[in-house]
Amino acid sequence: MPSMPASRVPILALTVLVAGASGGCGGAGAAGPPPARPRSALVITLDTTRADALGCYGGKDGVTPNLDALARESVLYEQARAVAPLTLPSHISMFTGLYPPRHSVRTNSLMALPAAATTLAERAAGAGFQTSAFVAALVLDGAYGLSQGFRNYTQPLRKQQSALRIKDTPAANVVRAATQWLRQTDRSRPFLLWVHLFDPHEPYEPSEEFLNQAGGDPYLGEVAATDAAVGYLLGKLREMDRMDETMVVVIADHGEGRGDHGELTHSTLCYDTTLLVPLLVRYPDGWGAGTRARDVVSGVDVYPTLIEALGLGDPGDVDGVSLFGRRPPPGRGVYFETYDGFLSYGWSPLTGWADERGKYLHSSQPELFDVRDDPHESRNLVAERQEDAVRYRERLSALAQRPAFEATRGAVDPALLEAVQSLGYTGAGDVDSELPDPLDTRGLPSPQSRLNELYRFYAASTAGEQGKFDEAVRLLQQVVDQNPRNATAMDLLGYFLNQSRRFQDAITVLEKLQALGPPERHSMHTNFGHAYEELGDELKALQHYERAAQLSPNGPLVLGDWARMLEKTGQAPAAAAVRARIDELTRAPRPSAASGGE
Ligand SMILES: [Zn+2]
């Protein structure tokens, strides 16, 4: 294998870090005394936060003073990548150490982490840690599996959700709740606390104070609000005298396109605008404070790093590597993917591998970038570096061969399934689709070649949200004509045809969507149900609402449709059971049992 010219080896590597931190020096990668073991850990995940949004990553001055101050006490990783530009798969990788093909959660809301998987919180709880999570958005609803091992899991109320918009808990409220939990913890036992902050996710609506702090940039204003919340939480930790025992890890789940490469937000492409994330690791004994590492690292490294730091034993067969006082092995590369285009729009999967030599993106239109010389990924070198491309493809192929958990479809809640079955309903069976392996493009168009389609789709959504249903229908019809495999556009077209009271047209579109096959969307059944209900076909409406409820058993709106139709068709006891379930789902969370036993 050709070696890199010495002049191009990143100089700010951990060798500097180790020597600088400990004052000692030794053999390659093993210099100086190791860091002291922290007792407890605080993991802060920043949603939708590009690395370069932070001052310490070269962003605009004054936007993130608290994170910049934390960076001066931490090891800062310059080449940390998310495993996916999607909130749920990315977080699950952090807490399991597994890449998405292995933990099997490839997108938001359609799949849940199987109970058989082991999370960091389960390992910590098993060792007597007090465990608690505070998440700011229902994309991380505990029903998707991340609540495994957390004794307290505080999330937004499900009833606050609307059909079209995510409602999040502001960062300031999340950290206040987390602080209250910290106050009531048992000082004699260690803790694992996870705090998730969602403000930088669109829509960007910062307060005037934070908008001004960010020089009028609304996205950065949300980042500033998040930074202030981080500052508040760390300040409280210091006040409580817990900072000296606590390892702090700050990482983002993915970045934000902001128009780069034609991508406005995130989820469909895998350029570094949405994959490079901030990663700060603060050791309580000051190990490595203020140093910057160029090592190629990933969100999957959070799990093994904290397993080692907290003395929780062997991390097991995971994809991540421990960074606790050490560098990743030489030649290390990291995997990333998005199946959002495949699952939502009928495009090819987009997968890839990055290491210190470059970054390869696999799709029906492969790309290879030398991200050190070309950090903006503007020169595709795939034609001239075929050997490298082959090598990267081998990595992707090898990953596909590794053992994986079987996906659990939907946020399946056993209690609800039981309640439903006791009413005489039987599930229509699992509808798992086999997802293509990372190298299998299925001959579909690549995501980066279909951005115009995406823009038209966004324009239609916006028109629909503003009540311009005819305009939304016209634009979505164009999208579907151009790409008859765009399931999301067809689903939304059905929705807006219903809004325009064109119920028969809606059914025609939805039947074409259903014929495309899995994944089966609960929203499609809801749209079917609304159309049939309006046309007076109560039996068909009931069937579709029931199926939607099976696919989304924790969705109060979905369950509400089902309950209404059960009432209309004279099935009062069944309707009452579903209503009781809705009440349970939308009730305010219980006060956390913070310091109780296991
Ligand atoms: Zn996210």
Image: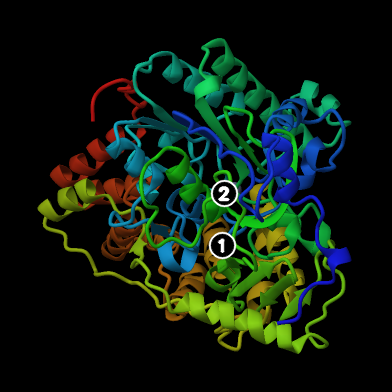
- From what the image shows, is residue 162 above or below residue 462? above
For mark 1, does the 10 Å Cα neighbourhood hold few (<14), some (14 to 19), or many (20 or more) residues? many
Q: Which residue is mark 1?
A: 492
Q: Position of residue 503 (x, y in %)?
A: 48, 65
Q: Is residue 197 visible?
A: no
Could you tell me the amino acid type at mark 1? Leu
Q: Position of residue 328 (x, y in %)?
A: 60, 57
Q: Please name the residue shown 43% across and 53% down the image.
A: 96
Q: Please name the residue shown 52% across and 56% down the image.
A: 321
Q: How many marks?
A: 2
Q: Please name the residue shown 61% across and 84% down the image.
A: 444
Query: Which quarter of the figure has residue 251?
Result: top right
Q: Is residue 367 left or right of residue 310?
A: right
Q: Label 2 vs label 1: CA separation?
A: 44 Å
Q: Please name the residue shown 42% across and 19% down the image.
A: 181
Residue 323: numbered disc: 2
